[in-house]
Image (tube, rainbow, N blue to C red):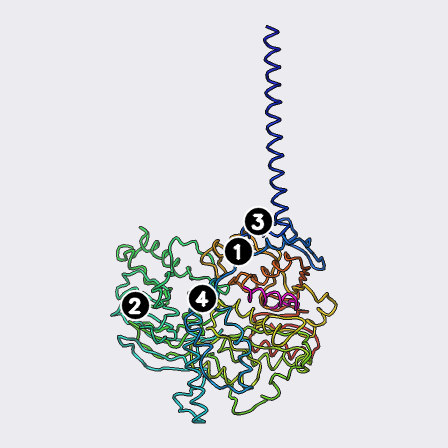
Amino acid sequence: MKKYLLSRKVGRKKWAGFLLIIALGIILFTRYSSVGKSYSSSVGESPKKQSAFEFFNNNNNEGSNDVADENVKLPESKSVVELVTFKEKTRLINVEGLNELYSLNYNFSKEESKALLVWNKMRLLLSRSDGLNLTAQGVKEAAIAWNDLLVFIEKSKATKSLDEKENEDCPYSVTAFNATTSRDGSNLRIPCGLVEDSSITVIGIPDAKQESFQIELAGTKLPEELKPPIVLNYNVILPGENLTKEPLITQNTWTDESGWSKVEKCPDHGSTDLIKVDGLVKCNAKIFRNNVEEIANATSPSSPISADVSNASAYGTSNYPFLEGNPFTATLWAGIEGFHMTVNGRHETSFAYREKLEPWLVSGVNVIGGLDIISILAKGLPVSNDLDLGFDVEDLKAPPTPKKRLVMLIGVFSTGNNFERRMALRRTWMQYEAVRSGEVAVRFFIGLDKNRQVNFELWKEAQAYGDVQLLPFVDYYSLLTLKTIAICIMGVKILPAKYVMKTDDDAFVRIDQVLSSVKGKDPNGLLYGGISFESAPHRDKDNKWYISVEEYPPSSYPPWAHGPGYIISRDIAKFIVQGHQERELMLFKLEDVAVGIWVEEFRRKGNKVQYVDDDRFHNAGCDSDYILAHYQTPRMVLCLWEKLQKEHEPNCCE
């Protein structure tokens, strides 16, 4: 028995030794293979390029959260550099309308062509097969608008003065009185679109003979479209003569291409949508909750009227803002994020702007259905400048730029009909000595509008002040990243600058403080502003900043600077321009995050990066000792400037 056990033990040892030898052999073979692959890469064979997902997930430990003044430089290894490509090089494709934007024969003077300096360098960017979602539509519509504008410019030069109907101003307000809606609805034309704080007030009396009425904001119709897009359809379902129907408000949009979009209801029973628009609830559920409570009270056994009131009849209570025969005042106003409706002074609903249906697109108001209209008033509309008066134009005109390199180029995002915002900036922080001396240049970057009058007013403004750069696409929010690249192109190739800054037309910038802040810093590899070091893509489809997994697979973003204002150094701006010329950098629709992605790519190419976070860059609002204050109306911008001039302190106005 002992011999048997001993032989079993010896046998086990032999098998263990045999298995150990096999395992060692496999390890040595694998090691040899990996060495061979590493060597082949080092002698010239390009390694396989990674996707964005592989790139971020395989490099999580390489210091993506570098803090200010910690310069990170990767080893100068060719294999490491070649791995950091987000996408394969994209193709160039034919985009409808692009040839028209670049081949229309028109003899611009040297002065006129200054508004098109960046325009002439963006064709390849707009031809990329991986273009942003609305690039094709934005280019196609821009070609139509551009051709229309050129014809109008030529006509204005030939006749010196246009007919009053053709050359309408952009007025502050328009009205319509004592109109009863017909079958097709009553129209109020909005000459130059809406801007933030524009409002449309309807005073009317619901008609008991009809079940509903609608207030529609119509967009600009293209020649090939059968109907104009509906930027907002505000549909009110009435309780009925006998208060037998459930009152309901629905909001929606419509385009010729996509039809009706997702409807939003108020009330929306069982909805878990808690997203607010400009801080306001999408539906004032309180009025409907009161209705339910009254139903319960009216149908309880102790109620003296329970026998005479049904569940349905209780829907028509005094809390519902729209009742047959009762006059109301409803004001629909444009916020930063969406439209808001107040009725008789109380907030009722909010509706976030839908993609490519933005307030500047609105060209008319239609009121349809059962409503006797007393009046419609649209006010707070964009007002163009009366350049014929010549008032302070020369004092506000962009000064000549020196032949030497600028210290800084500041690119300002703006839209065509934001005339008042641009004038507020010209009269305030664009009057800093650094700007007037030519040390710093400020330029507005603006895509075309679909409205001819807006484009004509914008063209005249560009010629008068010399600080507007027109861009060859319609100014959709989803195309903002193209503006960022345009700013870099100007700061690298047209007005070479040591630093490039991006900001918005509702931001107040203390240029003196910006310059003093960058003065003591290394002028290379700089991203300076309000830095977000830890953030992730929004995967909720209803979120304004929704990003799908297909658009961006990683679960987190690299460090990026908030969009209202940030500064990059010339080497980063040059890297961005060259990277897009060679189609090696990815396009991403969130422009501030896109810059962070490109800076991370710059860093992984072996360049040092300084992420300088400064909490004086205020992403929303104003605080004392600010460098940049955001969401400032033209009145507040003027107020901030006045305080600086009188008090010499950066104090906020509200």
Q: Secondary structure at mark 1?
A: loop
Q: The N terminus is located in which quarter?
A: top right
**Magenta stretch in the rendered image:** 565-582
Classify residue 377 as left or right of residue 611.
left
Name the quadrant containing residue 503: bottom right
Please tell me how many numbered marks the rendered image carries: 4
- Which residue is labeled 3 in the image? 57
Spatial distance from mark 2 to mark 1, Cα to Cα? 40 Å
Kind of residue sitting beneath label 2: Ser
Looking at the picture, how far across and down is residue 488, in whole percent? 59, 70
Mark 4 vs mark 1, foreground winner is 4
Q: In the displayed structure, would residue 588 be above or below residue 472?
A: above
- Please report whichever mark, 2 or 4, sits nearer to the chain's N-terminal start: 4
Closer to the camera, 148 or 582? 582
Mark seen at residue 639: none
Residue 649 picture quarter: bottom right
Disc sitting over residue 93 in the figure: 4
Q: Which image quarter: residue 100?
A: bottom left
The crowding category of the residue bearing disc 1, from other C-alpha atoms within 10 Å (few below 14, some 14 to 19, many at least 20), is: some
Residue placed under numbered mark 2 in the picture: 212
